[in-house]
Image (cartoon, rainbow, N blue to C red):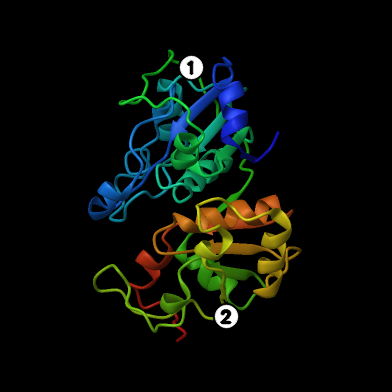
Amino acid sequence: MDLLVSTAWLSENANREDVKILDGTWVLPADEDTLARGYIPGAQVFDIDAIADTASSMKHMLPSAEDFAKAVSKMGIRNDDHVICYDRHGLFSSPRVWWTFMTFGHGKVSVLDGGLPSWIKGDHAVNPAPSGSRGKSNFKISSARIGVRNKSEVISAIDNDIQIVDARPSGRFYGTSPEPRARLRSGRIPGSFSLPFGSLKTADGYFKPLNELADIVGASGIDLNKPSITSCGSGITAAGIAFVLHRLGAKDISLYDGSWAEWGASDAPLEI
């Protein structure tokens, strides 16, 4: 099974009973008008702000295992289904959906390269509204295939030979550009590596070829044989970094769910 699938593949396989398509778009209200419109036929919406820890003060934090199982069971997703995640940006929030499924043990999950813009570019049909569930299922949680870390665990990782990989643009990493969220400090987690998510994509919104990704990751100083914790602004593009590291064969990957939205608002150690 390929972690990254093309629109040509999806066009040929979308009607299979074991293929479930999820629109995992997350967008700031100001950006809504810039996105491709419509839904891939058969796609249901996976709302990362709703299928989340709604008791948290931060948005789209990982839900409990029970809440996740209830949500995907309501969507009719079974343990043997192949889940395809995409977003209307092209590549932005869909890896966050991939990571969420992986965290709850579902390994048959892929990202659609280029997302909805690529689907439209291929002259495939688009529906004006998402699809409903094909019926309920009884999804069972299994052992995590990828990790999640909290702030205290990241603090402990700083001096323990665990790589912290930051997906934010370099200006925010080095503290030369302001944070888009109010009341957040500028800078980075001490000792972290800069790997901007944008550097992993082509100009037209696809992931770069795997050999180029390997070169970019290597040039950033990241060792695929060492444990890595990915971070970003609020846990979305950190999932994109985790996705790339996983495709490159890294074995020990976790995501810092609170990311800079939590770290920058706290008194945790800071480097500028």
Q: In which quadrant will I find the C terminus?
A: bottom left
Q: Position of residue 225 (x, y in %)?
A: 76, 63
Look at label 1 and name its amino acid.
Ser
At mark 1, the secondary structure is loop
At mark 2, the secondary structure is loop
- Report the label total: 2
Residue at image position (55%, 57%) is: 202
Residue at image position (27%, 48%) is: 32
The reply to whether residue 250 is in sight is no
Please state which of residues 174 and 79 is positioned toward the viewer in this rendering: 174
Please state which of residues 140 and 220 is positioned toward the viewer in this rendering: 220
- Which of the 4 quarters of the picture holds residue 269? bottom left
Residue at image position (33%, 73%) is: 179
Q: Which mark is residue 191?
A: 2
Q: Write down the residue under mark 1.
A: 137
- Which of the 4 quarters of the picture holds residue 58? bottom left
Residue at image position (44%, 21%) is: 42
